[in-house]
Image: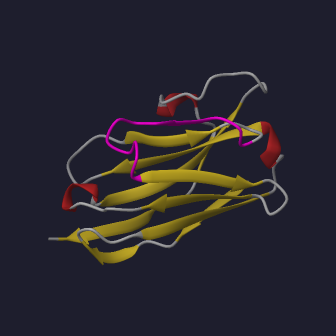
Amino acid sequence: VQLQASGGGLVQAGGSLRLSCAASNFMFSRYTMGWFRQASGKDREFVIGISRNGRNTYAADFAEGRFTISRDNDQKTVYLQMDSLRPEDTAVYYCAADHTILTAPISRNPLEYDYWGQGTLVTVSS
């Protein structure tokens, strides 16, 4: 099982970044996908998630209206579009996969997620 996150980098406040997470060696379409982040000295926190079929999403309050998640089950990839970035968005961003039934709600609990990517660093300068 592999989740390979990419797309992080340095961006100025107000800018945008698009993260990608490519999955391999598991049934991607049977997993809810989520993005989490961890800033230096802080706990890992939920950012946004997307259901198995891509029809439902759920975002943390700070991500609502600025961050968008999408997925391509044929390409086994999940994306995180981040707009209007703020310095407080600086963190390592992780993608994660949660094996769920189709109708399960999107969990914001990292313990519910089965597989994790290695993380990609996003730095937002003021």
**In the rendering, at what x and y percent does residue 32 appear?**
67, 38
Q: Is residue 100 left or right of residue 48?
A: right
Q: Residue furthest front?
A: 65
- Residue at the image point whose x is 20% and y is 62% from the top: 87
**In the rendering, at what x and y percent does residue 22 appear?**
68, 63
Q: Where, quadrant-wise, is the N terminus in this rendering?
A: bottom right
**In the rendering, at what x and y percent does residue 95 appear?**
55, 52
Question: On the image, which quarter does residue 8 sit in?
Answer: bottom left
- Residue at the image point whose x is 38% and y is 50% from the top: 37
Q: Is residue 41 left or right of residue 116?
A: left
Q: Is residue 97 left or right of residue 61?
A: right
Residue 102, above or below 73: above
- Residue at the image point whose x is 35% and y is 67% from the top: 122
Residue 61, magenta (yes or no): yes
Residue 18, above or below 102: below
Residue bounds of the magenta highlight: 54-66
Q: Where, quadrant-wise, is the C terminus in this rendering?
A: bottom left
**In the rendering, at what x and y percent does residue 86 appear?**
24, 60
Residue 121, magenta (yes or no): no
Of residues 41 and 30, the one nearer the viewer is: 30
Question: On the image, which quarter does residue 15 sit in?
Answer: bottom left
> Does residue 61 appear anywhere in the picture?
yes
> Does residue 118 appear anywhere in the picture?
no
Q: Is residue 98 left or right of residue 44?
A: right
Prevailing secondary structure of the magenta residues = loop
- Residue at the image point whose x is 39% and y is 70% from the top: 16
Query: What is the number of callouts on the image?
Result: 0
Colour scheme? secondary structure
